[in-house]
Image (tube, grey):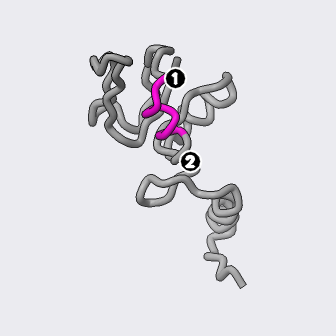
């Protein structure tokens, strides 16, 4: 499976033996990862907080190839859909939205 991770992480099996790591040079780029990481608590936690994205389909892959940091703020945390739309609107118009 392909993933994009915004953080370094080490995935371990049920015995605690590491079997896959996201190294600093792998952050923010599409990386091949074993399907077994889906079963780990760390994977679920990172996906839930928005630090890791697993490619679900071809459209998802293309989007992540073009902009792997889409949907995150400056700190790498997930932004809401409203915040993403607001940022896209601001980028298009060249004006910052005051939110009022």
- In the image, is 97 to the left or to the right of 76? right
Q: Position of residue 81 (x, y in %)?
A: 69, 55
What secondary structure characterizes most of the magenta part? helix
User: Which residues are drawn in magenta?
Assistant: 39-47
**Residue that label 1 marks:** 38
| Of residues 27 and 22, the one drawn nearer to the viewer in this rendering | 22
Q: Position of residue 14 (x, y in %)?
A: 38, 18
Task: Give the SS element for disc 2.
Answer: loop
- In the image, is 94 to the left or to the right of 51? right
Name which residue lies at 33% across and 29% down.
22
What distance separates the C-alpha of mark 2 from that of mark 1? 22 Å
Residue 84 among those drawn in magenta: no
Q: Is residue 74 above or below residue 98?
A: above
| Of residues 87 and 21, the one drawn nearer to the viewer in this rendering | 21
- In the image, is 74 to the left or to the right of 82? left
Name which residue lies at 27% across and 17% down.
17
Q: Quadrant of the C terminus?
A: bottom right
Which of the 4 quarters of the picture holds residue 5? top left
The local crowd at label 2, few if under 14, some if 14 to 19, many if 20 or more residues have their Cα within 10 Å, is few
Residue 45 among those drawn in magenta: yes
Q: Is residue 92 above or below residue 1?
A: below
**Residue that label 2 marks:** 70
């Amino acid at each position: 499976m392909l993933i994009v991770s915004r953080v370094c992480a080490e995935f371990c099996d049920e015995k605690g033996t590491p079997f896959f790591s996201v190294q600093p040079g792998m952050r923010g780029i599409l990386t091949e990862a074993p399907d077994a990481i889906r079963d780990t608590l760390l994977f679920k936690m990172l996906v839930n907080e928005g630090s890791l994205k697993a490619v679900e389909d071809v459209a998802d892959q293309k989007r992540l190839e073009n902009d792997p940091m889409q949907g995150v703020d400056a700190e790498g945390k997930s932004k809401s859909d409203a915040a993403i739309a607001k940022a896209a609107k601001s980028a298009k118009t060249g004006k910052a939205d005051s939110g009022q």
